[in-house]
Amino acid sequence: MVKSTAIAAGLAWIALAPDVRAQGHSGIPEIDTLPLRDWGGPDHPLSYPTTIGLSALVPGGGQIYGKHPVRGGFLIGLETLLAGLAIYSNAVDIPHWRDQADEALDEADLLFLRESLEPDSAATLEGLRRKQVAFARDRSRLATQQQDLANSQLAWAIGMHVYGMLDAAEIAWLSRHREIENRSVKRAMWYGLAFPGGGQLYNHRYGKFGMLWMTLGASVVSAWSRQEMVDVLKRRYDVALRENASGATELSEIKKDQTLFRKRRNQYFWGMALFYVYAVLDGMVDASLSDFDSPSKFAVVPGPDGSLALAWNIPF
């Protein structure tokens, strides 16, 4: 009860200060004259084409040019790692396993021909042929699963590159716009609901907009790739079921893998929904914090019992 009274008193005190609220500042000269964004960064206006172009050519290039080397180094390291793993898998691992599968199938065809030519050794040759077919299936399974992983790695690397370009654009924008504009929480909310990342664009948070779409885009590709794996495993299960030689253990393993990839696909769908909601809330918070120093938004006020209370007013 005491805390509620103190908060109500704080809101009443805010309502009695329209002149300070209109200014959008604290009203204290010592605070209002402090430099904004005094944590480093460029000390002169940056060129948009140069900043974005460097980021497009080299991962993290725009960040390093804009005097954010830590952020640029992070982009260089992670993007290079993801792209390198995807390229290596597509160039080395996947072709190697597919070649092994093709060789095993060719050997199985030869053994099948020998069965008709050597009836006395048919039982032995059939056993060898089944081993070759099982080996080919195993290599094909490894290649398919590695392709699924490589698709996700490449999607995240491309998404991170686009994020780096938009983040560099934000660095250039901040170098040209030192003043913080007061923004509407309601407008940020509606923009965010109408379009994923709309609130971030409204707040000029291009880096966050790029990060959101990096996550959404890469999640879509990853979910599509997981669905491809579900379809492949379904076809493999149907083939194994038609072949009476397939045992219950193999069918159970295929079914288990199919359930696993279906679950991973669904997790990406849930993740996209959660990121969409997070983006709306993040845009609203950024809009609210655009006028952080104004008592119309935040204030520490004395309560009736002498205690302090934090008052936070968000108009809708």
Image: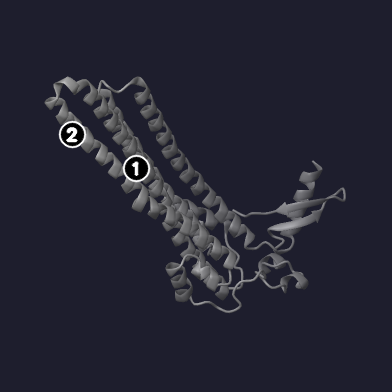
| Cα separation between marks 2 and 1 | 24 Å
Q: Is residue 228 above or below residue 278?
A: above
Q: Is residue 266 above or below residue 192?
A: above
Q: Which mark is residue 110?
A: 2
CB of mark 2 within 8 Å of CB of mark 1? no
Against 13, residue 20 (above or below) is: below
Q: Position of residue 154 (x, y in %)?
A: 40, 53
Residue situated in front as seen by the camera: 97 or 273: 97
**Few, some or many residues within 10 Å of mark 2 (<14, 14–19, 20+):** few
Closer to the chain start, of discs 2 and 1, is 2
Q: Residue furthest left?
A: 117
Q: Residue drawn 72% across and 71% down? A: 32
Residue 190, horizontal then vertical, whole percent:
50, 54
Which label sits in the foreground, 2 or 1?
2
Mark 1 neighbour density, 10 Å: few (under 14) some (14–19) many (20 or more): many
Secondary structure at numbered mark 1: helix
User: Is 285 positioned to the left or the right of 219 in the image?
Assistant: right
Task: Name the one closer to the observer, 115 or 186.
Answer: 115
Q: Nearer the viewer, residue 236 or 161?
A: 236
Q: Residue at the spot x=64%, y=71% of the render?
A: 40
- Count of number-bearing discs: 2
| Residue 9, horizontal then vertical, whole percent | 78, 52
Question: Residue 183 at what x, y percent from top left?
Answer: 58, 62
Residue positioned most to the bottom: 44
Image position of 210 with respect to 116: above or below: below
> Image check: 304 left or right of 65?
right
Residue assigned mark 1: 143
Q: Is residue 198 visible?
A: no
> Which residue is outermost to the right?
306
- As helix, strand or loop, the secondary structure at mark 2 comes to helix
Residue type highlighted by circle 1: Ala
Three-letter code for the amino acid on which mark 2 is drawn? Leu
